[in-house]
Image (tube, grey):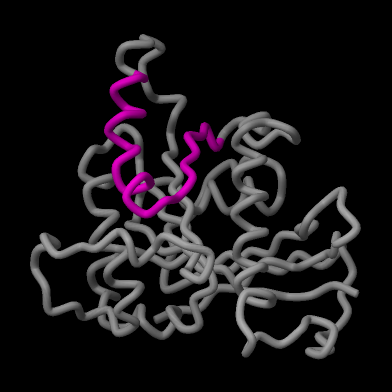
């Protein structure tokens, strides 16, 4: 039996999120990614609790939501339900990292129209714990960062802020390289752990959660990897 769960990706446009979702789901780089208009969906086959007696196979949907300001008032249609959040930023663009709090606030407000213009009251504690929405932070375009260890160490320190505040793992990737998510690598392990957390919270963390066995979802084969586009 293969189960289906939806994970949304909410990020600002132009930070390599389309290349990221393609690498995660297709295990290969994309040659010429197009701008996301509205939302596109990619599907990944994930082995939950791989290598344990509880191993199960799930289809995970990654929702790549366009970040254009012109679509701000309509993005909320994609925000519910939210099972997990992947915050993506450009390692060469400091502003994209600083905007992650804004994007997180927009997603969690569900209507995309937060009344706050600043985030002094941002409370990271509400994201920590097994009952909260799992979050993963990914910095892309690592290949464009100088090879200087000093520069890279500064990039890692700067980018760690929101991940540490939310108790989230963080990954730094070159989406043009297959080896960036090679099996057994630190990045691959963190990504797999994130998917496990999402599934754990969705199906097993509360009394209200329905067992996947009782949901009777449709059975799919691993050859189905659809990509859908939804225009605002």
Decide which of 58, 74 is in the foreground and name it: 58
Residue 223 relative to residue 78: left or right: right
User: Dividing the picture into quarters, in which one does residue 37 lie?
Assistant: bottom left
Decide which of 77, 229 is in the foreground and name it: 77
Vertical side of 152 occupied by 20: above or below: below
Q: Measured from the top left, where is residue 107 in percent x and y?
A: 35, 72
Vertical side of 202 occupied by 25: above or below: above
Q: Measured from the top left, where is residue 139 in percent x and y?
A: 42, 40
The magenta stretch spans residue 41: no
Q: Residue at x 41, y 54 (%)?
A: 87
Q: Residue at x 57, y 53 (%)?
A: 21
The residue range painted magenta reads 152-175
The magenta stretch spans residue 173: yes
Q: Measured from the top left, where is residue 30 in percent x and y?
A: 60, 44
Q: Residue at x 39, y 81 (%)?
A: 232
Magenta residues, dominant SS class:
helix
Residue 107 relative to residue 205: left or right: left
User: Dividing the picture into quarters, in which one does residue 93 lie?
Assistant: top left
Q: Measured from the top left, where is residue 151 in percent x and y?
A: 30, 16
Q: Residue at x 35, y 40 (%)?
A: 90
Q: Quadrant of the N terminus?
A: bottom right
Vertical side of 74 occupied by 178: above or below: above
User: Dividing the picture into quarters, in which one does residue 206 lie?
Assistant: bottom right
Vertical side of 27 occupied by 184: above or below: above
Residue 106 relative to residue 54: left or right: left
Decide which of 195, 203 is in the foreground and name it: 203
Residue 63 relative to residue 66: left or right: right
């Amino acid at each position: 039996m293969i189960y289906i769960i939806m994970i949304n990706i909410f990020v600002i446009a132009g930070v390599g999120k389309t290349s990221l979702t393609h690498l995660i789901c297709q295990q290969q780089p994309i040659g010429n990614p197009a701008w996301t208009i509205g939302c596109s969906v990619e599907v990944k086959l994930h082995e939950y609790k791989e290598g344990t007696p509880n191993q199960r196979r799930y289809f995970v949907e990654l929702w790549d939501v366009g970040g254009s300001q012109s679509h701000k008032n309509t993005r909320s249609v994609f925000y519910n339900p939210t099972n997990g959040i992947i915050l993506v930023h450009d390692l060469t663009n400091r502003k994209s990292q600083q905007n992650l709090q804004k994007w997180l606030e927009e997603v969690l407000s569900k209507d995309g129209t937060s009344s706050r213009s600043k985030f002094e009251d941002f409370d990271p504690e509400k994201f920590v714990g097994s009952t909260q929405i799992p979050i993963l932070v990914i910095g892309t375009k690592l290949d464009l960062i100088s090879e200087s260890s000093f520069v890279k160490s500064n990039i890692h320190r700067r980018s760690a802020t929101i991940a540490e505040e939310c108790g989230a793992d963080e990954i730094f990737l070159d989406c043009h390289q297959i080896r960036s998510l090679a099996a057994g690598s630190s990045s691959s392990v963190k990504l797999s752990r994130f998917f496990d957390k999402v599934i754990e919270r969705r199906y097993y963390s509360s009394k209200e959660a329905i067992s996947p066995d009782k949901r009777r979802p449709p059975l799919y084969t691993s050859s189905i990897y659809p990509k859908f586009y939804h225009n605002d």
